Image: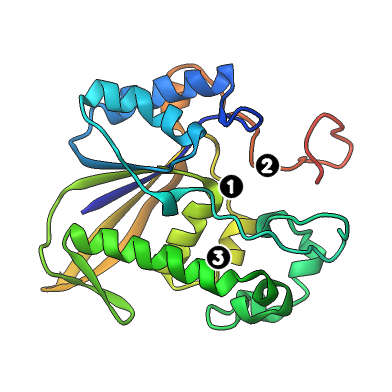
Amino acid sequence: MRLLIIRHGDPDYEHDSLTPQGWKEAELLSERLAKLAISACYVSPLGRAKDTASFTLKKLGCTATECEWLREFFVPISRPDVTDRKKISWDWLPQDWLAEEDFFRRDLWMDQKILREAGMREEYTRVTKEFDALLARHGYEREGEYYRAVRPNRDTVALFCHFGLECVLLSHLMHVSPMILWHHLCAAPSSVTTIYTEERRQGIANFRVSSFGDTSHLYAGGEEPSFAARFCETFDCESERHD
């Protein structure tokens, strides 16, 4: 089986939709995805993800199943240096989260005081259980640390969702803390992450990433990836996001 995890196009967060650049990205993305034999599509309930999927669904002549758990992964926390409002986990400053070694541990990262008080374990467990249920419907049932290939197949399944949520799903498949992925990977708007199953012994499957955050469809259409999800390349870039 092939999984495609697709981030929405350049977002207009105020209206939960896409910017003009985002609509261009969604159109170019659809030209790429329409060439694939996609057997099932799933989409976040948020507008920016549904708008991104709309062009592809029209070209494929199909509908997507809306999944509440595919919405952006949002567990607001009290970031150490910000006391007047809650922040998302992937917006922490590196000097703060890197100081705690347990954030790198897949078995301990959720037990850190700030995350524990925010209910991180409960939300992470809820989302990953829903993800496993979807995979089971497509023939791959989680059994401990790997997946049982109950109905092995070569289907292509597309998930239209969000960066933070994507890292949660990848961390579950890769058996790592999502803190590493949230802070060290960047999936540009409309990017595609491709994951294949590998069944090296009959009945036992592993999920392996063949490409992360691919934006080749944008370059093919003469568009540069938008800046969303990144922070300033150098501190003196006043027009780029610092915090």
Structural distance between the alpha carbons of marks 1 and 2: 7 Å
Marks 1/2 in contact by CB < 8 Å: the verdict is yes
Q: The residue tagged with tag 1: helix, strand or loop?
A: loop
Quarter of the view holding residue 227: top right
In the rendered structure, the answer to whether residue 209 lies left or right of residue 109 reads left
Depicted 111 relative to depicted 23: above or below: below
Quarter of the view holding residue 221: top left
Residue marked by disc 3: 178
- Crowding near the residue tagged with mark 3, few <14, some 14–19, many ≥20 C-alpha atoms within 10 Å: many
Quarter of the view holding residue 204: bottom left
Structural distance between the alpha carbons of marks 1 and 3: 13 Å
Residue marked by disc 2: 230
**Which residue appears at 75% of the width and 59% of the height?**
92
Lower position in the chain sequence, tag 2 or tag 3? 3
Lower position in the chain sequence, tag 1 or tag 2? 1
Structural distance between the alpha carbons of marks 2 and 3: 17 Å
Whole-percent x, y for residue 133 in the image: 28, 64
Q: The residue tagged with tag 3: helix, strand or loop?
A: helix
Whole-percent x, y for residue 199 in the image: 18, 67
Please state which amino acid type lies under the numbered disc 1.
Answer: Cys
**Which residue appears at 89% of the width and 37% of the height?**
236
Marks 2/3 in contact by CB < 8 Å: the verdict is no
Residue marked by disc 1: 186
